[in-house]
Amino acid sequence: MDFHALFPLKEKSSWIYRTDRGFLSVAVTECQVVAGKNFFVTETRVDNELLQREKYLVDVDTFWLISRNFGSKVLVYDPPNPILVAPAEVGRIWEWKGTCGGQPLELKFAFTDTDVITVPAGRFPSLKMEIHEKGGQGEAHTERWYSFGIGVVLEKSVSDLMNFEVALESYKPG
């Protein structure tokens, strides 16, 4: 299976997620090739208002999160954060240490399981990723299920600041 199909970043691709507070949408709004490298920008909206923009660099075996913008606040990952690393298979583990917006941050990622996940958009064979986060804002644990060709179908996060869950309502490929 094509590793890049875990997070299909193609211009005009969009996802709508159901949350306990309503709906949020994610869309790929920019795709650029700079010096032979692929960059993508996604925008997340709640009630049609921009919540955040994320900038990614994608190479042959890694999806790198470069920055997140919340309005005028820009949080840069230094070094870039490897949010997905090949091979995408159960047992794959990696770590990242750096800063986000100047604050120290440590992340541990692991692909831990496969399952068929049922969400409002349907049933999807999925690969489960667990993320443990430790930083200036406390600790968080996230479980994220990816389906090849679609991307994230379900995410549950528990942190010192808040808890949330998003489930895929619909997906439109670009």
Image (spheres, grey):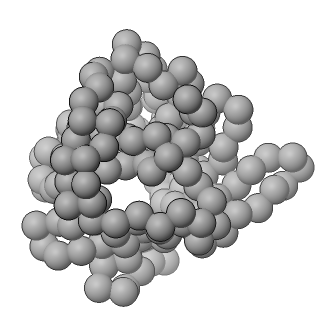
The quarter in which the C terminus is drawn is bottom right
User: In the image, is residue 73 above or below residue 161?
Assistant: below
Residue 59 can be seen in this image: yes
Instruction: Give the left or right position of residue 77, taking residue 106 as reference.
Output: right
| Residue 137 in sight from this viewpoint | no
Residue 70 image-quadrant placement: bottom left
Q: Position of residue 164 (x, y in %)?
A: 16, 56
Residue that lies at the very extreme toward the right in this rendered image: 35
| Residue at the image position 36 percent from the left and 86 percent from the top | 48
Q: Residue furthest bottom?
A: 48
Q: Quadrant of residue 111?
A: top left
Q: Position of residue 142 (x, y in %)?
A: 24, 40
At a point 25% along the width and 54% down the height, the residue shown is 122
118 or 153, which is in the foreground? Answer: 118
Q: Is residue 55 above or below residue 82?
A: below
Residue at (29, 85) in percent of width and height: 47
**Closer to the camera, 149 or 29?**
149
Name the residue rendered at 43%, 48% in the picture: 151
Residue 38 horizontal/vertical position (percent): 74, 50
- Furthest toward the top, the residue is 91
75 displayed left or right of 142? right
* Image position of 67 with respect to 27: above or below: above
| Front in this rendered view, residue 145 or 165 | 145
Percent x, y of residue 17: 28, 65
Q: Indicate the quadrant containing the N terminus: top left, top right, bottom left or bottom right.
A: top right
Q: Is residue 36 left or right of residue 116?
A: right
